[in-house]
Amino acid sequence: LSGVVFFLALSYANTIISIPFDLYSTFRIENKYGFNAMTWKLWTSDFIKSIILSTILIGITTSGALYLMKASPDFWWFFVWLFFLLFSIFMMYISPYVIEPLFNKFTPIENEEIESSIRDLMKKVGIKISRVFKIDASKRSTHTNAYFTGIGKVKRIVLYDTLLKKMEKSEILSVLAHEAGHWKKKHVLKMIIVVEAMSLIGIYISFMMIKSGILLRIFSIHNDTVFASLLILGFIGGIVSFPLKPVFSYFSRRHEREADRFAADMAENPEAMATSLIKLSKDNLSNLHPHPLYASFYYSHPPVVQRIREIRGQQ
Protein backbone atom coordinates (compact mmCIF):
# COMPACT_ATOMS: atom_id res chain seq x y z
CA LEU A 1 0.00 0.00 0.00
CA SER A 2 2.82 2.41 0.81
CA GLY A 3 4.27 1.92 -2.67
CA VAL A 4 0.95 2.71 -4.34
CA VAL A 5 0.54 5.83 -2.20
CA PHE A 6 4.11 6.90 -3.02
CA PHE A 7 3.65 6.71 -6.78
CA LEU A 8 0.17 8.24 -6.63
CA ALA A 9 1.66 11.17 -4.71
CA LEU A 10 4.27 11.61 -7.44
CA SER A 11 1.55 11.53 -10.07
CA TYR A 12 -0.55 14.12 -8.22
CA ALA A 13 2.49 16.37 -7.78
CA ASN A 14 3.26 16.16 -11.49
CA THR A 15 -0.37 16.94 -12.32
CA ILE A 16 -0.44 19.97 -10.03
CA ILE A 17 2.77 21.33 -11.57
CA SER A 18 1.36 20.89 -15.08
CA ILE A 19 -1.93 22.73 -14.38
CA PRO A 20 -0.74 26.30 -15.11
CA PHE A 21 1.03 25.16 -18.29
CA ASP A 22 -2.08 23.34 -19.50
CA LEU A 23 -4.29 26.32 -18.72
CA TYR A 24 -1.93 28.69 -20.53
CA SER A 25 -1.75 26.39 -23.55
CA THR A 26 -5.53 25.94 -23.72
CA PHE A 27 -6.93 29.34 -22.81
CA ARG A 28 -4.10 31.59 -23.96
CA ILE A 29 -2.23 30.08 -26.91
CA GLU A 30 -5.11 28.04 -28.39
CA ASN A 31 -7.46 31.00 -27.90
CA LYS A 32 -5.03 33.38 -29.54
CA TYR A 33 -5.02 31.40 -32.77
CA GLY A 34 -8.71 30.51 -32.75
CA PHE A 35 -8.35 26.82 -31.92
CA ASN A 36 -9.88 26.62 -28.46
CA ALA A 37 -13.58 25.94 -27.98
CA MET A 38 -13.31 24.56 -24.45
CA THR A 39 -15.12 26.20 -21.55
CA TRP A 40 -13.83 26.36 -18.00
CA LYS A 41 -16.61 23.96 -17.00
CA LEU A 42 -15.54 21.39 -19.59
CA TRP A 43 -11.86 21.80 -18.67
CA THR A 44 -12.68 21.18 -15.01
CA SER A 45 -14.81 18.15 -15.89
CA ASP A 46 -12.02 16.67 -18.03
CA PHE A 47 -9.50 17.35 -15.27
CA ILE A 48 -11.55 15.58 -12.60
CA LYS A 49 -12.22 12.59 -14.87
CA SER A 50 -8.53 12.35 -15.74
CA ILE A 51 -7.52 12.42 -12.07
CA ILE A 52 -9.98 9.65 -11.19
CA LEU A 53 -8.94 7.58 -14.19
CA SER A 54 -5.21 7.97 -13.56
CA THR A 55 -5.70 7.09 -9.89
CA ILE A 56 -7.40 3.83 -10.86
CA LEU A 57 -4.85 2.93 -13.54
CA ILE A 58 -1.79 3.85 -11.46
CA GLY A 59 -3.26 1.97 -8.51
CA ILE A 60 -3.73 -1.18 -10.58
CA THR A 61 -0.38 -1.09 -12.38
CA THR A 62 1.68 -0.09 -9.35
CA SER A 63 0.13 -2.62 -7.00
CA GLY A 64 0.50 -5.35 -9.63
CA ALA A 65 4.14 -4.51 -10.38
CA LEU A 66 5.15 -4.23 -6.71
CA TYR A 67 3.42 -7.52 -5.91
CA LEU A 68 5.34 -9.28 -8.70
CA MET A 69 8.63 -7.76 -7.51
CA LYS A 70 8.01 -9.16 -4.05
CA ALA A 71 6.65 -12.53 -5.18
CA SER A 72 9.49 -13.27 -7.62
CA PRO A 73 12.70 -11.49 -6.52
CA ASP A 74 14.85 -13.09 -9.24
CA PHE A 75 12.49 -12.98 -12.22
CA TRP A 76 10.21 -10.04 -11.53
CA TRP A 77 11.73 -8.14 -14.48
CA PHE A 78 10.08 -10.57 -16.90
CA PHE A 79 6.77 -10.86 -15.06
CA VAL A 80 6.46 -7.09 -14.65
CA TRP A 81 7.15 -6.61 -18.36
CA LEU A 82 4.57 -9.27 -19.24
CA PHE A 83 2.04 -7.73 -16.84
CA PHE A 84 2.39 -4.28 -18.42
CA LEU A 85 2.20 -5.77 -21.93
CA LEU A 86 -1.03 -7.65 -21.19
CA PHE A 87 -2.48 -4.66 -19.36
CA SER A 88 -1.69 -2.39 -22.32
CA ILE A 89 -3.42 -4.78 -24.72
CA PHE A 90 -6.41 -4.94 -22.39
CA MET A 91 -6.58 -1.14 -22.25
CA MET A 92 -6.37 -0.90 -26.05
CA TYR A 93 -9.35 -3.24 -26.23
CA ILE A 94 -11.63 -1.55 -23.68
CA SER A 95 -10.63 2.07 -24.31
CA PRO A 96 -13.04 2.67 -27.24
CA TYR A 97 -15.94 1.30 -25.20
CA VAL A 98 -15.18 2.48 -21.66
CA ILE A 99 -12.66 5.33 -21.55
CA GLU A 100 -13.14 7.37 -24.73
CA PRO A 101 -16.93 7.77 -24.19
CA LEU A 102 -16.15 9.44 -20.85
CA PHE A 103 -14.78 12.43 -22.76
CA ASN A 104 -16.67 12.45 -26.06
CA LYS A 105 -20.05 11.52 -27.45
CA PHE A 106 -19.92 8.91 -30.20
CA THR A 107 -22.76 8.93 -32.74
CA PRO A 108 -23.22 7.34 -36.18
CA ILE A 109 -22.49 9.76 -39.02
CA GLU A 110 -25.66 11.09 -40.63
CA ASN A 111 -24.34 11.25 -44.19
CA GLU A 112 -25.12 7.80 -45.57
CA GLU A 113 -23.29 8.54 -48.83
CA ILE A 114 -20.02 9.20 -47.00
CA GLU A 115 -20.45 6.13 -44.80
CA SER A 116 -21.15 3.96 -47.85
CA SER A 117 -18.06 5.33 -49.60
CA ILE A 118 -15.96 4.69 -46.49
CA ARG A 119 -17.16 1.09 -46.31
CA ASP A 120 -16.46 0.59 -50.02
CA LEU A 121 -12.93 1.97 -49.58
CA MET A 122 -12.22 -0.25 -46.58
CA LYS A 123 -13.56 -3.27 -48.45
CA LYS A 124 -11.28 -2.38 -51.36
CA VAL A 125 -8.18 -2.27 -49.13
CA GLY A 126 -9.22 -5.39 -47.21
CA ILE A 127 -10.07 -3.95 -43.79
CA LYS A 128 -13.22 -5.04 -41.97
CA ILE A 129 -15.00 -2.28 -40.07
CA SER A 130 -17.88 -2.64 -37.64
CA ARG A 131 -19.03 0.96 -37.14
CA VAL A 132 -18.32 4.46 -38.44
CA PHE A 133 -18.68 7.12 -35.76
CA LYS A 134 -18.28 10.84 -35.42
CA ILE A 135 -17.34 12.50 -32.13
CA ASP A 136 -18.16 15.95 -30.83
CA ALA A 137 -14.56 17.17 -30.96
CA SER A 138 -15.74 20.69 -31.79
CA LYS A 139 -16.68 21.26 -28.15
CA ARG A 140 -12.96 21.32 -27.34
CA SER A 141 -11.18 22.68 -30.39
CA THR A 142 -11.34 23.35 -34.11
CA HIS A 143 -8.62 20.79 -34.87
CA THR A 144 -9.50 17.93 -37.21
CA ASN A 145 -8.64 14.25 -37.06
CA ALA A 146 -9.73 10.72 -37.89
CA TYR A 147 -8.52 7.40 -36.55
CA PHE A 148 -9.11 3.66 -36.31
CA THR A 149 -9.75 1.78 -33.08
CA GLY A 150 -9.91 -1.90 -32.28
CA ILE A 151 -7.68 -4.92 -31.88
CA GLY A 152 -7.63 -7.74 -34.38
CA LYS A 153 -9.19 -7.86 -37.82
CA VAL A 154 -12.28 -5.73 -37.17
CA LYS A 155 -11.88 -1.96 -36.74
CA ARG A 156 -14.05 1.02 -35.83
CA ILE A 157 -13.58 4.31 -37.64
CA VAL A 158 -13.90 7.57 -35.73
CA LEU A 159 -14.18 10.95 -37.46
CA TYR A 160 -14.05 14.33 -35.77
CA ASP A 161 -17.16 16.39 -36.49
CA THR A 162 -14.79 19.21 -37.45
CA LEU A 163 -13.32 17.00 -40.18
CA LEU A 164 -16.76 16.26 -41.60
CA LYS A 165 -17.56 19.99 -41.70
CA LYS A 166 -14.32 21.17 -43.30
CA MET A 167 -13.47 18.49 -45.86
CA GLU A 168 -15.01 17.17 -49.05
CA LYS A 169 -15.90 13.51 -49.38
CA SER A 170 -12.84 12.72 -51.52
CA GLU A 171 -10.58 14.38 -48.96
CA ILE A 172 -12.14 12.46 -46.07
CA LEU A 173 -11.62 9.23 -47.98
CA SER A 174 -7.98 10.11 -48.64
CA VAL A 175 -7.40 10.74 -44.93
CA LEU A 176 -8.93 7.35 -44.10
CA ALA A 177 -6.94 5.68 -46.88
CA HIS A 178 -3.81 7.04 -45.18
CA GLU A 179 -4.92 5.54 -41.85
CA ALA A 180 -5.73 2.28 -43.61
CA GLY A 181 -2.19 2.31 -44.97
CA HIS A 182 -0.82 2.21 -41.44
CA TRP A 183 -2.85 -0.91 -40.69
CA LYS A 184 -2.12 -2.67 -43.97
CA LYS A 185 1.61 -1.97 -43.60
CA LYS A 186 1.41 -3.14 -39.96
CA HIS A 187 3.08 0.04 -38.71
CA VAL A 188 1.33 -0.07 -35.34
CA LEU A 189 2.32 -3.69 -34.76
CA LYS A 190 5.94 -3.01 -35.76
CA MET A 191 6.22 -0.06 -33.37
CA ILE A 192 4.66 -2.06 -30.54
CA ILE A 193 7.18 -4.88 -31.06
CA VAL A 194 10.12 -2.45 -31.05
CA VAL A 195 8.87 -0.55 -27.99
CA GLU A 196 8.14 -3.73 -26.05
CA ALA A 197 11.53 -5.21 -26.91
CA MET A 198 13.25 -2.07 -25.66
CA SER A 199 11.03 -2.06 -22.57
CA LEU A 200 12.06 -5.62 -21.76
CA ILE A 201 15.73 -4.69 -22.08
CA GLY A 202 15.22 -1.57 -19.99
CA ILE A 203 13.38 -3.43 -17.22
CA TYR A 204 16.07 -6.12 -17.13
CA ILE A 205 18.82 -3.49 -16.82
CA SER A 206 16.79 -1.85 -14.05
CA PHE A 207 16.51 -5.19 -12.29
CA MET A 208 20.28 -5.69 -12.42
CA MET A 209 20.97 -2.18 -11.13
CA ILE A 210 18.50 -2.53 -8.25
CA LYS A 211 19.87 -5.96 -7.36
CA SER A 212 23.46 -4.72 -7.29
CA GLY A 213 22.59 -1.69 -5.16
CA ILE A 214 24.74 0.54 -7.35
CA LEU A 215 22.14 3.31 -7.46
CA LEU A 216 21.98 3.56 -3.68
CA ARG A 217 25.77 3.77 -3.47
CA ILE A 218 26.12 6.37 -6.21
CA PHE A 219 23.51 8.66 -4.69
CA SER A 220 24.55 7.92 -1.08
CA ILE A 221 21.12 6.63 -0.09
CA HIS A 222 21.55 4.70 3.14
CA ASN A 223 17.96 3.54 3.43
CA ASP A 224 17.63 0.40 1.29
CA THR A 225 14.30 1.15 -0.36
CA VAL A 226 13.22 0.01 -3.81
CA PHE A 227 11.09 3.15 -4.19
CA ALA A 228 14.17 5.38 -4.26
CA SER A 229 15.82 3.13 -6.84
CA LEU A 230 12.73 3.15 -9.06
CA LEU A 231 12.49 6.93 -8.83
CA ILE A 232 16.14 7.34 -9.82
CA LEU A 233 15.69 4.87 -12.68
CA GLY A 234 12.76 6.93 -13.92
CA PHE A 235 14.98 10.01 -14.21
CA ILE A 236 17.80 8.03 -15.82
CA GLY A 237 15.37 6.47 -18.30
CA GLY A 238 14.20 9.90 -19.41
CA ILE A 239 17.78 11.02 -20.00
CA VAL A 240 18.84 7.85 -21.81
CA SER A 241 15.75 7.79 -24.05
CA PHE A 242 16.24 11.36 -25.30
CA PRO A 243 19.05 10.50 -27.78
CA LEU A 244 16.77 7.80 -29.19
CA LYS A 245 14.07 10.31 -30.17
CA PRO A 246 15.54 10.98 -33.64
CA VAL A 247 15.59 7.24 -34.31
CA PHE A 248 11.93 6.74 -33.40
CA SER A 249 10.96 9.94 -35.21
CA TYR A 250 12.79 8.78 -38.33
CA PHE A 251 10.91 5.48 -38.47
CA SER A 252 7.64 7.26 -37.70
CA ARG A 253 8.19 9.65 -40.63
CA ARG A 254 9.08 6.72 -42.87
CA HIS A 255 5.82 5.01 -41.90
CA GLU A 256 3.91 8.20 -42.68
CA ARG A 257 5.46 8.35 -46.16
CA GLU A 258 4.50 4.71 -46.76
CA ALA A 259 0.93 5.45 -45.65
CA ASP A 260 0.82 8.49 -47.94
CA ARG A 261 1.92 6.37 -50.91
CA PHE A 262 -0.67 3.75 -50.03
CA ALA A 263 -3.41 6.40 -49.83
CA ALA A 264 -2.38 7.97 -53.15
CA ASP A 265 -2.45 4.54 -54.83
CA MET A 266 -5.81 3.51 -53.37
CA ALA A 267 -7.73 6.78 -53.59
CA GLU A 268 -9.91 7.44 -56.63
CA ASN A 269 -8.64 11.02 -56.62
CA PRO A 270 -4.95 11.12 -55.53
CA GLU A 271 -4.97 14.93 -55.61
CA ALA A 272 -7.50 14.83 -52.74
CA MET A 273 -4.72 13.59 -50.46
CA ALA A 274 -2.69 16.70 -51.24
CA THR A 275 -5.64 19.06 -50.79
CA SER A 276 -6.58 17.41 -47.50
CA LEU A 277 -3.02 17.98 -46.23
CA ILE A 278 -3.20 21.62 -47.33
CA LYS A 279 -6.44 22.08 -45.39
CA LEU A 280 -5.04 20.30 -42.34
CA SER A 281 -1.90 22.44 -42.37
CA LYS A 282 -3.96 25.64 -42.69
CA ASP A 283 -6.38 24.61 -39.95
CA ASN A 284 -3.54 23.67 -37.59
CA LEU A 285 -1.19 26.51 -38.64
CA SER A 286 1.53 23.95 -39.31
CA ASN A 287 5.12 25.05 -39.75
CA LEU A 288 5.75 24.55 -43.46
CA HIS A 289 9.54 24.77 -43.23
CA PRO A 290 10.74 23.59 -39.79
CA HIS A 291 14.45 23.49 -39.00
CA PRO A 292 15.79 20.07 -40.08
CA LEU A 293 17.41 19.41 -36.70
CA TYR A 294 14.21 20.21 -34.80
CA ALA A 295 12.18 18.11 -37.22
CA SER A 296 14.57 15.17 -36.82
CA PHE A 297 13.89 15.12 -33.08
CA TYR A 298 10.25 16.10 -32.74
CA TYR A 299 8.42 15.58 -36.04
CA SER A 300 6.61 12.25 -36.23
CA HIS A 301 5.35 13.29 -39.70
CA PRO A 302 7.41 14.70 -42.57
CA PRO A 303 6.89 18.46 -43.05
CA VAL A 304 3.69 18.97 -45.01
CA VAL A 305 5.44 20.58 -48.01
CA GLN A 306 7.57 17.45 -48.45
CA ARG A 307 4.52 15.21 -48.15
CA ILE A 308 2.60 17.13 -50.81
CA ARG A 309 5.57 17.13 -53.21
CA GLU A 310 6.02 13.38 -52.81
CA ILE A 311 2.30 12.68 -53.27
CA ARG A 312 2.06 14.82 -56.40
CA GLY A 313 5.27 13.27 -57.68
CA GLN A 314 3.55 9.87 -57.69
CA GLN A 315 0.74 10.99 -59.97
Image (spheres, helix red, strand yellow):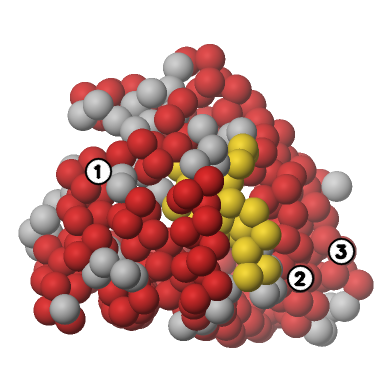
Task: Give the crowd class for mark 3: few <14, some 14-19, many >=20 residues within 10 Å.
Answer: few
Residue identifier under label 2: 86
Q: Quadrant of residue 82?
A: bottom right
Query: Residue at left 30%, top 30%?
Result: 35
Q: Nearer the viewer, residue 17 or 295?
A: 295
Residue identifier under label 3: 67
Q: CA distance from mark 3 to mark 1?
A: 45 Å
Q: Are marks 1 and 2 in contact (CB under 8 Å)?
A: no
Percent position (x, y) of residue 270? 24, 69
In this picture, residue 300 sits left or right of residue 220: left
| Mark before the other along the chain sequence, 1 or 2 | 2
Query: Residue at left 31%, top 79%?
Result: 265
Name the amino acid, label 2.
Leu
Q: Secondary structure at mark 3?
A: helix
Residue identifier under label 1: 284
Q: Are marks 3 and 1 in contact (CB under 8 Å)?
A: no
Residue 141 seen from this side? yes
Q: Quadrant of residue 109?
A: top right
| Mark before the other along the chain sequence, 2 or 3 | 3
Name the amino acid, label 3.
Tyr
Give the tally of numbered discs.
3
